[in-house]
Image (tube, grey):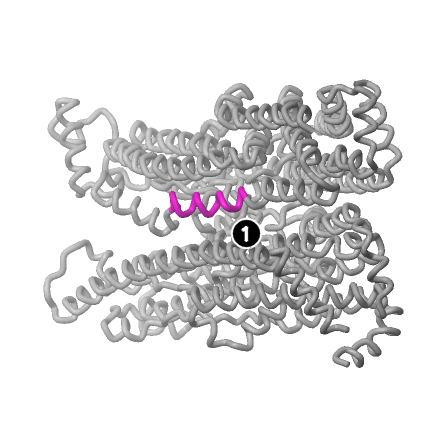
């Protein structure tokens, strides 16, 4: 078997096409690494600058009414994760900053994609673009004729007459097709890890994530290798083998994911922004409005509070009722947002499940989701981030409303909070989920990848004996 | 000879069931893509009709209240919510600016899945900072849509490759090339004529299917025959590009698997690698300026303006005496100060916005300068423009909304400053928004560019032989 592997590898090294393809890949990877690195540095710097600038705007506020400060609001920013240099995921399609203010949960705004031209929809040459789309092609290029060439040059009978075991032959050929890509991919991830570890102010970098990514990409390449060798075994000529392998590649990487988009849209359509906001407005209408003491829910809260403290007027409460009502109103509105966003998240999850279910047609989908999840550039992470921001918003509103409640008296006009106190508002922080949790969330994807690995592999053994 | 080859090729394609397979595959692909595109347009129209309905309902309640107020009848609700106050109209009853889909919008999703198609600019707030992003699952944006543009740009070239990659090499591999070479026609012309015939079949099939699809999904599209014709010819010139490539590869390489490999390599380069590289290099050389920095600066300017409120108001009234006439300055409230400081804000933030736009345009200019390096980009840009879903259309929509919001504010502002009430008459005079598609698609220019690219490539690779043999062959064509 070793002889077969060595013979195949020697042939590969001698093949001019492989050399050209390897050079092109190297150039593309180099462009991707250099540009991604500079972009990462730039946006990481921008992120740090914006975070500190925004904090200083908040902290340098002159004494003012805490509720006025709540309306003035502030921005929070999504951290720049180390592996987003490798896989941009959905980062370009979602904004990275959220404006937080009183009474309102805002979405992340100003996505980069909305400022780009429609050319961006072709994709961007990131490192994982090369790994996702081009590396499988290298496997196809190496392996499409691994069996057909023996038939075309009439050496297959010769091989058989030598008494070679078909299983040994298939494993040897299979390994020889996979080996170069295995080496290349490992080098790419090693270089990536080394570059990342050199960057200053790097957030959430871990070698374990890099090795996991490497493992998952290799798993996908193993699938492509098995399929390519299998197709080569079944094909009558190299041309047919190549065209069939390419058809598999394009349907994995382009056709199935796009079909999934349309299925997901038809089965679980997203509401339009205006319909979603109108629904929230309707829900808010009959609820507690922190600004309006005359609304029914506010009156009910007043009675409940008076009963709780055993007093007959809000003036006799041990705190300023206005601040208390404001906070209760805020919590009530936060509940409305929570309920509506939970529904929206359900739609998003169902849509994503439409993609993930189609992974039985394309292992690419499982790989794509896993890759961006591990790189912390997925929509999963974005949801987690927006949920943390909302928690922080409520915490911030409580900080400000409590100040009114505890330090001002009812009916006091022109109450202001000292400028020093603005500095005491805790800073926003966000930690991505641990790798194990990410892998658990992607159990289905991992299962699909494993199945995709096993079935063609069995097919190889079965077919090897038959030809 | 051409007619002999034509009839032989036709028989061959019919017997090998190639034409049938091709017809059904293309029909299936285009039908599915049109269905998807149509669903997207339907959703857009349905979202628009929901907002329109809500808008009309809200407006009719407001109008009824206005009539009541004018008749002196009692009206419920706090005074600041009454529509007789011009700023209540400006802030609670904004007009609706709608961007309806065009008749060919279903052919290319373009940027339409990212943006909203309606906006209601209020008198309060920064109009330049309005967020036009639509609510959408970003995973969908990442994977993209299966629309006609996808079929034309990505899949049909692969079908062409499968249809043409081994025309000459197959004959060589089957050993029939010698028989062909013995015929009274050069192999070069034989291949050329064969490809011309296949190109004609392919174009006829796709154009026919596209025609039927457009008739089914968009009867209005046939109104603009000239654009439609441009669209068909653009698609044909793109197919031609791939046939030209197949011709050159067949001649130069002449080995089935190597041919397929080279053509797929070209496909990869044209539809994937070149666009992605231009995009990435463009982003690296001219990074998108940080909106956050811009917003930070605007917020800082705003803060500064708030501190100088009285001073700003005095200057504003000096510059606009018509608004101050006959009014006591002391009666001026929040809205008056707001408009006065808004003007200052506008002046101060203008350079910031201009700087931002300039940086953005530099990137866009760089990227668009390289669009001619790939016919796929030319076709994508053209299809988006014909479908009115390009970024240019959305930027122009934003511009039109911005212009309209100015017009709308300027209508309400004098009523506020004159301390008049908003009346039923004013309601009917309110400016209305009409979206105009002001972007020229220049499809014929792109058709010309694509044909020129094809011509140049043909001349470079097969120039000599073509120039020498074709006129003669064409003269002899029907002899």
Residue A201 visible in the picture:
no
Q: Residue at x 59, y 50 (%)?
A: A121
Which image quadrant is residue A268 in? top left
Q: Residue at x 71, y 53 (%)?
A: B270
CA neighbours of label 1 inside 10 A, class few (<14), some (14 to 19), many (20+)? many
Q: Residue at x 48, y 52 (%)?
A: B113
Q: Nearer the viewer, residue A19 or B393?
A: A19
Q: Residue at x 54, y 52 (%)?
A: A114
Q: Secondary structure at mark 1?
A: helix
Which image quadrant is residue A179 in? top right
Judged left or right of residue B437, residue A184 is: right
Q: Position of residue B96 (x, y in %)?
A: 36, 63
Quadrant of the image containing the C terminus of chain B: bottom right
Q: Position of residue A160 (x, y in %)?
A: 79, 25
- Magenta span contains residue A257: yes
Q: Which residue is mark 1?
A: A114
């Amino acid at each position: 078997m070793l002889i077969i592997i060595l013979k195949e590898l020697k042939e590969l090294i001698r093949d001019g096409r492989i050399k050209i393809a390897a050079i092109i890949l190297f150039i593309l990877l180099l462009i991707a690494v250099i540009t991604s690195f500079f972009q990462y540095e730039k946006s990481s710097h921008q992120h740090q600058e914006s975070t500190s600038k925004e904090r200083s705007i908040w902290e340098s506020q002159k004494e003012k009414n805490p509720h006025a400060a709540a309306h003035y609001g502030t921005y929070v920013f999504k951290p720049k994760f180390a592996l987003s240099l490798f896989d941009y995921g959905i980062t370009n399609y979602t904004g990275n900053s959220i404006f937080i203010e009183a009474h309102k949960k805002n979405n992340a705004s100003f996505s980069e994609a909305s400022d780009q031209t429609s050319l961006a929809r072709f994709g961007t040459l990131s490192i994982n673009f090369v790994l996702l789309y081009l590396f499988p092609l290298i496997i196809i290029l190496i392996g499409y004729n691994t069996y057909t060439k023996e038939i075309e040059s009439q050496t297959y009978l010769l091989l058989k007459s030598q008494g070679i075991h078909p299983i040994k032959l298939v494993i040897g050929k299979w390994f020889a097709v996979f080996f170069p890509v295995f080496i290349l991919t490992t080098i790419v991830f090693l270089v990536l890890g080394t570059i990342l570890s050199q960057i200053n102010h790097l957030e959430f970098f871990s070698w374990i994530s890099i090795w996991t990514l490497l493992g998952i990409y290799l798993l996908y390449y193993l699938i492509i290798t098995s399929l390519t060798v299998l197709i080569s075994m079944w094909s009558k000529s190299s041309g047919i083998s190549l065209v069939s392998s390419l058809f598999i590649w394009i349907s994995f990487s382009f056709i199935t994911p796009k079909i999934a988009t349309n299925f997901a849209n038809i089965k679980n359509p997203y509401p339009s922004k205006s319909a979603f906001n109108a629904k929230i407005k309707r829900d808010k209408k009959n609820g507690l409005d922190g600004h309006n003491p005359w609304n029914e829910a506010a009156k009910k809260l007043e009675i409940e509070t008076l009963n709780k403290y055993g007093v007959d007027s809000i003036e006799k409460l041990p705190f300023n009722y206005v601040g208390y009502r404001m906070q209760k109103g805020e919590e009530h509105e936060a509940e409305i947002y929570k309920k509506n966003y939970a529904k929206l998240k359900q739609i998003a999850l169902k849509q994503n499940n439409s993609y993930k279910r189609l992974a039985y047609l394309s292992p690419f989908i499982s790989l794509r989701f896993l890759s961006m999840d591990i790189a912390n550039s997925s929509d999963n992470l974005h949801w987690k981030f927006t949920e943390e921001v909302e928690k922080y918003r409520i915490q911030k509103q409580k900080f400000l409303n409590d100040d009114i409640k505890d330090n001002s008296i009812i009916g006091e006009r022109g109450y202001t909070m000292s400028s020093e106190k603005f500095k005491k508002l805790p800073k926003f922080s966000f930690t991505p989920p641990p790798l194990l949790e990410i892998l658990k969330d992607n159990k289905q994807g991992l299962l699909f990848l494993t199945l995709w690995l096993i079935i063609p592999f069995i097919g190889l053994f079965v077919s090897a004996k038959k030809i | 000879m051409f007619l002999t080859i034509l009839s032989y090729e036709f028989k061959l394609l019919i017997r090998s069931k190639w034409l049938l397979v091709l017809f059904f595959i293309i029909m299936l692909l285009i039908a599915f893509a049109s269905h998807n595109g149509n669903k997207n347009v339907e959703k857009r129209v349905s979202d628009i009709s929901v907002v329109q309905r809500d808008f009309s309902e809200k407006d009719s309640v407001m109008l009824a209240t206005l009539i009541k107020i004018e008749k002196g009848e009692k009206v419920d609700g706090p005074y600041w919510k009454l529509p007789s106050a011009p700023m209540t109209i400006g802030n609670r009853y904004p007009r609706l600016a709608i961007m309806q889909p065009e008749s060919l919008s279903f052919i290319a999703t373009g940027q339409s899945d990212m943006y909203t198609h309606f906006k209601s600019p209020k008198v309060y707030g920064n109009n330049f900072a309005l967020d036009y992003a639509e609510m959408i699952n970003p995973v969908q944006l990442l994977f993209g849509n299966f629309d006609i543009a996808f079929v034309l740009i990505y899949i049909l070239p692969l079908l062409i490759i499968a249809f043409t990659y081994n025309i000459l090499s197959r004959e060589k591999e089957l050993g029939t090339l010698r028989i062909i070479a013995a015929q009274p026609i050069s192999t070069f012309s034989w291949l050329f004529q064969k490809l011309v015939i296949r190109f004609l079949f392919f174009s006829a099939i796709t154009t026919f299917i596209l025609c039927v699809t457009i008739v089914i999904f968009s009867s209005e599209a046939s109104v603009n025959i000239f654009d439609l014709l441009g669209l068909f010819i653009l698609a044909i010139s793109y197919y031609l590009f791939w046939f030209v490539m197949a011709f050159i590869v067949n001649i130069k390489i002449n080995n089935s698997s190597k041919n397929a490999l080279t053509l797929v390599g070209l496909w990869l380069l044209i539809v994937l690698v070149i666009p992605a590289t231009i995009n990435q290099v463009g982003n690296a050389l001219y990074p998108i300026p940080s909106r956050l920095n811009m917003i930070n600066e605007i917020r800082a300017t705003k803060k500064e303006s708030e501190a100088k409120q009285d001073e700003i108001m005095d200057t504003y009234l000096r510059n606009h005496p018509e608004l101050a006439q006959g009014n006591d300055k002391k009666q001026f409230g929040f809205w008056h100060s707001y408009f006065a400081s808004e003007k200052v804000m506008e002046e101060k933030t203008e350079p910031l916005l201009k700087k931002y736009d300039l940086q953005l345009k530099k990137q866009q200019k760089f990227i668009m300068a390289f669009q001619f390096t790939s016919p796929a980009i030319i076709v994508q840009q053209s299809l988006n423009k014909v479908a009115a879903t390009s970024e240019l259309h959305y930027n122009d929509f934003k511009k039109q909304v911005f212009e309209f919001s100015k017009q709308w504010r300027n209508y309400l502002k004098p009523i506020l400053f004159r301390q008049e009430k908003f009346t039923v008459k004013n309601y009917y005079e309110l400016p209305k928004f009409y979206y105009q598609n002001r972007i020229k698609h220049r499809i014929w220019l792109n058709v010309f560019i694509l044909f020129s690219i094809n011509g140049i490539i043909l001349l470079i690779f097969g120039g000599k032989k073509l120039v020498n043999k074709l006129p003669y062959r064409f003269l002899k064509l029907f002899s």
